[in-house]
Amino acid sequence: MLRAAFPLGSAYKVLQQGQLRAAAVLVALEPGRGVWLTRRSARMAAHPGQVSFPGGKIEPYDATPEAAALREAQEEVGLDPAQVEILGRMDDYVMTVTQFHISPVVALVPEKVALLPATAEVEEVFLLPFSVLLNPQYPVRRRAIRQMGVREFWVWPHEDHVIWGATAEILWRLAQRLRGVG
């Protein structure tokens, strides 16, 4: 099912980057279990304590978004790039509020992969089970009133974490694809 959702050479939208900060995230899927997420350290300057995928800024020396996502995953959670099978990319996502242009890179990791958070950046590594990701009742749409007006966003259920924002949007897109909808 996971490989079938990302057939070799499948197309994805690359959005015009403009003045946004380029970033790549690794959407790491563990067969039979789920997708790996992190809770960022409360000491981080950007998005402290929030749930995210391993990833970050695409550096000038990163040849591709895939290279950046693998480098960041190795730095943040100790994932050996040699253990990763890149399946492909999803459409780019732009966060206009924080000015990030995100390239989600989807990959398979081995069963029972050992991940160890780099405590300076990551407080916790955890799994969102496929049973939640593939459940058509999730995610739920929420609304908040901000200085810039009303904002709607997805929220995924998890007993220990609030999964929202760019992470929730990317998970929603992934779920649609795995469910054969998107």
Image: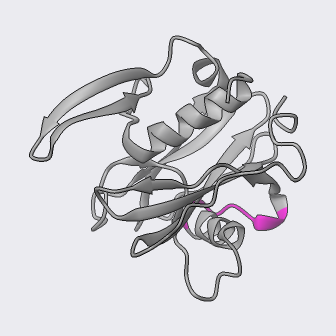
Residue 174 in view, yes or no: yes
As displayed, is residue 145 above or below residue 94?
above
| Range covered by the magenta-colored residues | 76-82
As displayed, is residue 74 above or below residue 92?
below
Q: Residue at x 63, y 72 (%)?
A: 68
Residue 17 position in % (x across, y down): 49, 70
Q: Nearer the viewer, residue 23 or 116?
A: 23
Q: Nearer the viewer, residue 108 or 7?
A: 7
Residue 127 in view, yes or no: no
Q: How is the image coloured?
A: one colour
Residue 113 position in % (x across, y down): 74, 47
Q: Residue at x 82, y 58 (%)?
A: 83
Quarter of the image where the C terminus is located: top right
As displayed, is residue 157 above or below residue 120?
above
Residue closest to the far left: 147
Q: Quadrant of residue 180?
A: top right
Q: Quadrant of residue 6?
A: top right
